[in-house]
Image: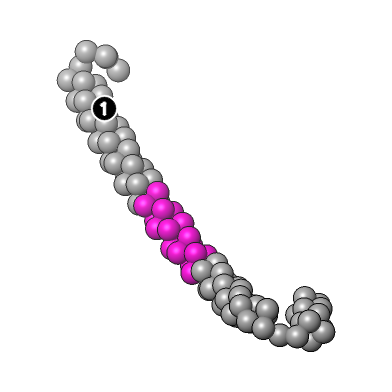
Amino acid sequence: MKLNSIQTKLIFSVLGTSIVAYLATFGYLLKTVSDNSHDDAQNIVIEQNRLYATRIQSILQTELGHVRGLADGFSHFNSIDDSLREVLFTNVFR
């Protein structure tokens, strides 16, 4: 087969154009899938962070309620007799 024939030039032209078209399509699809995967991963991370933040906030609110209860209880601690105060103090911190 001659390299200068019209048939050879046409085959190489069509083949080259097809390869460029396939590479462009593959590159576009790869970029789109990569971007979508990155966006989905970010959304998953944000949602997981919200979930854990809500759980932690709930735990901290519970503990803060306990501390407020203790603070309220100890705010009147000085008005109790010394003997009863010692018994209450040891029982609270067990």
The residue lying toward the viewer, choosing from 29 and 83, is 83
5 horizontally vs 85: left or right: left
The residue lying toward the viewer, choosing from 73 and 7, is 73
The residue lying toward the viewer, choosing from 94 and 3, is 94
Asked whether the viewer can see residue 35, the reply is yes
Q: Is residue 8 above or below residue 72?
A: above
Question: What SS does tag 1 mark?
Answer: helix
The residue lying toward the viewer, choosing from 91 and 30, is 91
Q: Residue at x 37, y 52 (%)?
A: 39
Q: Is residue 3 above or below residue 21?
A: above
Q: Residue at x 57, y 76 (%)?
A: 68
What amino acid type is highlighted by mark number 1?
Answer: Gly
Residue 52 drawn at (x, y percent): 52, 65
Residue 70 drawn at (x, y percent): 64, 78
Label 1 sits on residue: 16
Q: Is residue 7 above or below residue 84?
A: above
Q: Quadrant of residue 18?
A: top left
The magenta stretch spans which residues? 38-54
Q: Is residue 46 magenta?
A: yes
